[in-house]
Amino acid sequence: MMKKWTFLLALLPLSLFAQAQHTKVVLVEEGTGTWCQWCPRGDVYGIEMHKQYPKTAIYISVHDGDPMEMPDYADQLNLSGYPNGRIDRNTTTGLQPGALSSDLAPYLSQTPIAGVSSDITFNSTTRELTMTIEAEMGKDATGSYRLGAIVVENGMIGPSPRYDQSNSYSGGNFGTMGGYEKLPSPVPAGRMVYNHVARHLPGGFSGDSLSLPSQLDSAQTYTYVYKWTLPAEVNEDLIQVVGFMIDMSNGYMVNAGKSTYLSGKDNAAPFFHSDARTKGFKSLVYNYEVITHDPDADGITLSVASGPAWLSLTDNGDGTADLKGTPPSVGSFPVTIEVTDGQETTQQTYTLIVEEPTVDWVQVGKVGFSGNSGSSIDLEFDKNNVAYAFMSNSDNDFGQVYSFANNQWSQVGQNYSDINPFQCDFTIDPEGTPYVVNENTLKKWNGSQWETVGNGPFHSARVISPQVVIGLDGHPIVVGMETSGTSVSYQFDGSSWVSRGPVADGITVWYRLKTDLNGVITTIYGTDGSNSFYSEAARFTGSGWETYKGHVDGNDFTYFDHDIATTPKGDAYAALILGFSDQFLNIYKYDKGDETWKLIKANLSDGPAEDCMIESDINGTITVSYVDKNAGSKMSVQRLQNGNWEYLGIQGFTPGVAQANMTLNDAGIPFVLYSDVSAGEKLSVKRFEDFATVSVNDVSEKSSQNWRIFPNPNNGNFSLEGPHAERYELVDMTGRIHRANELNSTVDIQSVNLGSLKPGIYWIRLYSAQGNQTQSILIK
């Protein structure tokens, strides 16, 4: 019996010692910013850290230079660059996800002298947050120790462009990075949610000097209370407080602990980050890209709780889903989608209104038809309305040209090798010969190889931002800027290059060069600045350049993107993206009487935009395209009709895009070319279809009467009512002519039989001495 008591007494001190041990919790503080192109890596590091070490590691994102910034906090971390982080205020980590285990291992193996916990309460009336930080000692300690607190907020969102995230991993050129390789750069605010964001240091960077005594006794618990009144923009439901104990002798963390949310739970409910798409069209595919987020859970799932049978949801496994279906009828359809993290469930309920279709954006050929991603892209038509697409690729420094025929895109010739992918441009001549300008050299595809135009380079040195068009004489004209910023221009006369002088005085940047339907050549560029520039425009006189008077907008700098278009009547329009903080898209018209640019539409994009293009059709109707950041960096197109700006189709009709380009074919049909983020930033093209009968041509400017086609839709047999029609051409949506025939101009009603045709939307061009028109026709 005595031996047994001796054994138990021998175990007792060991038992007490084991109870006094505390788990080490590592604190990683990241320096980051929305402007930082590599900082998505830090986000992925934090996500992986909380997956692998949910109870033993805490991640905090300290922003600098953006709307979530805490510059004093960031400065005291003393990081040499972003993204970097401090581990327990000791070593620096480059936040490489693959190094996570080795980064944390030396710290996780430590036995801390105390355990740290954090508890919070909130007064919803005064918005005062009370933070109670506790240190439970495991052993005696003497020295300079402090208790501190860091308020963090999860689930932070905000408007574009200030909450867009720069992303060098876009396109996958630098490998996988937690899904960022599938997102554009910048990642639009509509896709970004920021977690673990430092919001306040109530006791300062190192805590309050009075928070702990110099002598700390084993098995004692020491408490210190901080208070903070939450600003209105802070979401109290998604805040937590990180408590820490720091050793001031070396500035290193002893231990840390994190509070629950105010709900008392460690888990916050997932939420919907996308607004439901509430409109659909009968017999056309409805597609709502659902975006959700959960601040804590590793895996969330989405499902349709209720909705019409024709609607189905594909969960992509990354918090997004595609809700698709083809409505068989018009009507109102209640829909409820659910997102759950296994503990909490959130619903999004809306009514889907399905109407008869009037317009649609239709895919032209294969999605992502190019073999590689595009760095610079362009879309052009030849005189036969054959579409050509150009792309350069920054991974391999080559250019490629594609043409569309037989419902597919095919590469024209060989790769243009050794190209500067960001200092090149493309055009097509009326016969379909591709031209590519690369810095100071222009080459064309002669059927067997890329052949230099002229005897060599058109300029003696490198040209930045070169642009090329084909003049009325069939010869190319190029503009650009020297490395000094001075503008240059050259015209090929059939045998050699002839200098046409500078386009403008001083530094010029960001060239766009256009040829209108009358062959008038205009250009728009940035000028009169050093780091920021105003937009200015000029037109080619045949021997030099004549500047449109004044800046397009003299009140604000252009944010990189602008474009110009001139109508057949000689009216000039400009599209500018203005303001580094706003990036709104404004539209201007040049007043030839006052010789000034007049603003005709402010903030057409109703928020930030990129990659704007402006075009005029033969009637002078203005169409504008842009990457719409409010729509998740998808394409939107608007047209000025009867004094009103109207969306063509739905806002944001493409997947997410990295960059985009728009042009019109001869019938005035908009085509958009875009680097498709959903297809690895390879090229895709869509065209606009208007199911209603519309007139888009009136080349004679004479008063002409509208013809009527009936029935429409039809099977290829129909009647044409209207006077003096002499002939017709039937054209598909790519511009290819399928049928052409003479008509009897002496009768007002005549029958037309188109024969066997593939069902779809076509354009029928009608020609007469009174004027020409193009109308849509639906073949069933």
Image (spheres, helix red, strand yellow):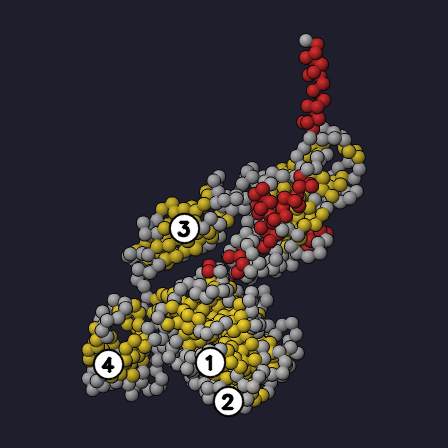
Q: Callout 1: helix, strand or loop?
A: loop
Q: Which mark is residue 446?
A: 1
Residue at 23 percent of width and 71 percent of height: 756
4 or 1: mark nearer the eye: 1
Looking at marks 1 and 2 on the same chain, the residue that comes earlier in the sequence is marked by 1
Nearest the eye: 114 or 271: 114
Looking at marks 4 and 1 on the same chain, the residue that comes earlier in the sequence is marked by 1
Is any atom of residue 223 visible in this view?
no
Looking at the image, is 526 positioned above or below residue 5?
Answer: below
Spatial separation of the CA atoms under disc 4 and disc 2: 46 Å
Nearest the eye: 176 or 222: 176
Q: Which mark is residue 494?
A: 2
Type of amino acid at the residue the image marks with label 3: Thr
**CB within 8 Å, label 4 to label 3:** no
3 or 1: mark nearer the eye: 1
The residue where tag 3 is placed is: 314
Task: Please provide percent x and percent y for residue 161.
Answer: 55, 62
4 or 2: mark nearer the eye: 2
